[in-house]
Amino acid sequence: MANFDNDLLNSPLLQLDFEQLDVLELVLGGLLDPCSIELSSIPQWAEIGEISPSKADGSKGVLLADPDGTALAVVNYRALDDGDKDSHEVIGVWPLAKPEHGSFRELRITSSLGSQPVVLFDQAPTPLDIQALRSRPSLPANTCFVLVCNSSGSRDPAHIDQIEQLQATAEIFEDVKVAHLVLPDSTSEHLAMERLSSHVVIDLRGFKDNAAATSQGVVFMFSGLSGSGKSTLARAVQQQIHQHLPQRAVLLDGDDIRRFISKGLGFSREDRETNVERIGWIAARISEVGGIALCAPIAPFHATRAAVRSMTTQVGRFYLIYVSTPLAVCEARDRKGLYAKARAGLVTDFTGIDSPYEEPVDADLILDLSVLDVQTATEQVIGLLRTQQTNL
Ligand SMILES: Nc1ncnc2c1ncn2[C@@H]1O[C@H](COP(=O)(O)OS(=O)(=O)O)[C@@H](OP(=O)(O)O)[C@H]1O
Ligand SMILES: Nc1ncnc2c1ncn2[C@@H]1O[C@H](COP(=O)(O)OP(=O)(O)O)[C@@H](O)[C@H]1O
């Protein structure tokens, strides 16, 4: 803490309100510049007058205190010669005591985290946020979940719930800490965010705004033979979305759906229709709340795909992506050995062997993954998404 002359320490105190305290704390921690302290906005300023001692350079000092009267900092300032007696330029700020205001003090961020990885939230994590976090490769060690809020929000009782929900979410992951950053409305948020951490893993702040600005949700249906590359492509698209776009994407993989939602269904035409319609229904719900659903069933029948298109376009966008990898290539891949079994008659009703695949005539994109690499195909899919965004 600074060592100041008695004259100054005997000066009257300027008592700050909570928002001004938040500003002061971020200035002292280096997240904001001293000029963020707007002395002219402090109501008692006029009463202080000229009583603080002048320094040789013409600057003066004043003490800034919390509402209890504890002096927290000395501000060195100079009156600006612009005809306005309340106009001051802050030259420097030095700490005297640690601020104690606000809830969850021990979790409050007031200085830079350096290169510590952060995930930024502006509300308690939503189920879609959690899904997005879980579907990523693991979070970097020592990641910090940071709830960013404004000064008045930090004093709302809902803030306590939000922190608790963030803490509960952090417990799902390994080695994740929780903190909050209180950004006063009057300050340069951009500067503080830039200084906070050089490693933002995901920025979930403003997701609601971005989602509202960019869309409606989107449903992608990747249809094609078993082994054509639907799941591989859908996974790569999901990763791209989470790395580069504000939206969240949920993967509805054929195999997963059959293990859970469609457990017990077989591969008759009727069962496949039921299965794909269920996927379509879930995808529509995801799209309805602004999410992106990536569906990767074989979906071999035109009528069922059309039914899903019609169901989902009521609430968002729908794109049918025909993954047209030829049967011979899929069969040669045969990762699960099912083609061999189908050829041997051990598995029946197998798509492409003894069950039909109706080639889409209404595909929005056709991708043959025997000739395209995953990255190129992913870029084409993301291209559809970007086109959609700029059109809005
Ligand atoms: N008879 C038969 N026909 C086709 N596929 C079969 C069959 N039996 C099991 N499997 C495995 O189930 C996966 C396809 O399920 P889907 O739900 O995508 O099919 S469908 O859309 O309901 O037609 C499919 O997975 P993917 O390879 O991911 O497509 C197969 O591994
Ligand atoms: N260009 C490609 N695109 C997608 N998958 C490819 C490609 N080249 C080879 N593969 C392989 O083909 C297999 C496709 O399997 P998968 O994605 O599960 O297909 P599906 O979901 O259509 O059954 C994977 O083993 C993948 O590594």
Image (cartoon, rainbow, N blue to C red):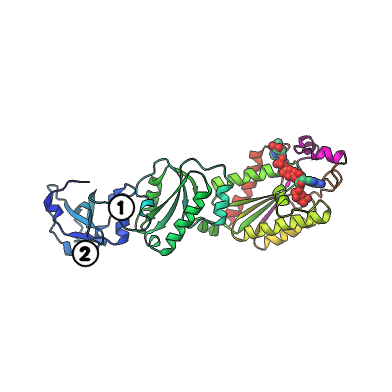
As shown in the figure, which amino acid type bears the numbered disc 2?
Gln
Residue that carries the numbered disc 2 in the rendered image:
44
Estimate the spatial distance between the alpha carbons at disc 1 and disc 2, rounded to whole Å: 20 Å
Residue at image location 80% in from the left, 52% down from the top: 266
Across and down, in percent, residue 271 comes to 80, 55
Mark 1 nearby-residue class (10 Å; few <14, some 14–19, many ≥20): many
Across and down, in percent, residue 88 comes to 22, 56
Q: Name the quadrant of the C terminus.
A: bottom right
Q: Is residue 333 magenta?
A: yes
* Quadrant field for ligand 2: top right
341 lies left or right of 368: right
Residue that carries the numbered disc 1 in the rendered image:
25
Question: In terms of secondary structure, where does tag 1 sit?
Answer: helix
| Boundaries of the magenta span | 318-345
As shown in the figure, which amino acid type bears the numbered disc 1?
Glu
Mark 2 nearby-residue class (10 Å; few <14, some 14–19, many ≥20): some
